[in-house]
Amino acid sequence: MSADVRPVPDHRSLAPATRTVSLGRPAHDPDAPLNSPPVPAGTYVAGGDVEYGRYGNPTWTAFEEILGSLEGGRALTYSSGLAAATAVLDLVSVGEAVVVPVHAYQGVLHQLRDREQRGLLHVRTVDITDTDAVVRTADDAALVWLESPTNPMLEVADLAAVCAGATEAGARVVVDNTFATPLLQQPLDLGADVVLHSATKYLSGHSDVVLGALVTRDDATFTALDEHRRSRGAIPGVLESWLAARRVRTLHVRLERAQANAAELAARLTEHPAVSRVRYPGWGAMVSIELAAGTPAADLMTRSTSLWVHATSLGGVESLLERRRRWKGEPESVPESLIRLSVGIEDVEDLWGDLASALASLPAP
Ligand SMILES: Cc1ncc(COP(=O)(O)O)c(C=O)c1O
């Protein structure tokens, strides 16, 4: 059985939908399996390129090949999105500065604050929608950390302008592309140095995997991260990598449906009297709402749906909702009543019916 991944020549000329389906597969040899099989390997027979289970695995490679092609770089998978974030932050030398969005995934913000408190780096916080401020703040910084759209405020950065300015200032730029996915935004093409994914979300898309990934465009950064992963050991599981490679194949159809649902729901929510604000970038499948009746009503709302599941996380086929400030690490500038909706691929009328009846059950503001 050959577990080697078959490189597809000129894959960049193929549409992303074709690449998600056709990359990361074994060679088309008689009786070869169509899909890369899961290869549980703690070690390998000596004399080859990989040698040991912590250094590489053909199951990781299959997923990395697909994601790398979609993002336009070389991918490395990790045990979680946060493990991938840790690897990037470990590249920052002691005493250097990191530019950080006011709003971003709270686990990343927490880790940055923790590193700052231990004297490892300096955190400079900016509003990522203010391009001039981000570029000004990037002066003398080692790293600019971007998330666009941001979690959960759904702010959008001008990535091309920010990347150009930050690079000019000498900073490396990392973009957390979890919310956009490589189908809607390719930050490396816009000038970023590293792209991060919580592959737990849209890439895997079924809420049954925890996995992370980084994608780089230059060899030096790839090598530094690869060596870091070998030596720190935050490697992905074989089952998770295999599931992610299966699931990413349908990313384009899942996203198409989820986006159409999100656009329709955002429009209806904007008209609803119980909703005081809708945050929706106009693309993607994430929508955040605020309720006129405030925080208790928001908590009640998350307990009042039957189809929408009250759960954290996002990017799955099933629709989820949660009030983000229930987490104590969430920045205080995130409104208390903000409910983040991860719109799935169910029938939009069923999704609306469930939301509308939960909204109707709330007390008047
Ligand atoms: C935007 C974003 N980045 C990174 C992470 C961390 O990923 P993981 O939960 O896979 O460690 C998350 C998790 O929610 C996220 O939403």
Image (cartoon, rainbow, N blue to C red):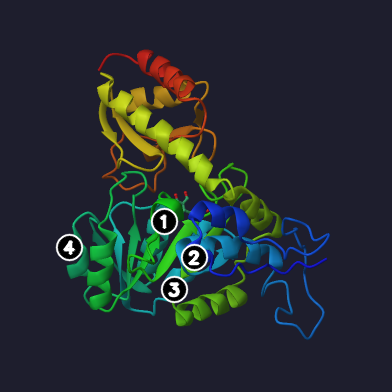
Q: Which mark is residue 133?
A: 4
Foreground: 24 or 110?
Answer: 24
Q: Secondary structure at mark 3?
A: loop
Q: Is residue 237 above or below residue 281?
A: below
Could you tell me the amino acid type at mark 2? Arg
Foreground: 108 or 199?
Answer: 199
Q: Is residue 296 left or right of residue 27?
A: left
Q: Which residue is mark 3?
A: 217
Q: Which residue is mark 2?
A: 12
Mark 4–mark 1 distance (CA, rounded to whole Å): 21 Å
Residue at position x 72%, y 72% in the image: 53
Of labels 4 and 2, earlier in sequence is 2
Could you tell me the amino acid type at mark 1? Asn
Q: Secondary structure at mark 2?
A: helix
Percent position of residue 343, x then y: 45, 34
Could you tell me the amino acid type at mark 3? Arg
Residue 110 visible, this orientation: yes
Pointer 2: residues within 10 angstroms few (<14), some, or many (20+)?
A: few
Of labels 3 and 2, earlier in sequence is 2
Percent position of residue 201, x then y: 51, 47
Pointer 3: residues within 10 angstroms few (<14), some, or many (20+)?
A: many
Q: Nearer the viewer, mark 3 or mark 2?
A: 2
Residue at position x 27%, y 63% in the image: 160
Image quarter for residue 130? bottom left
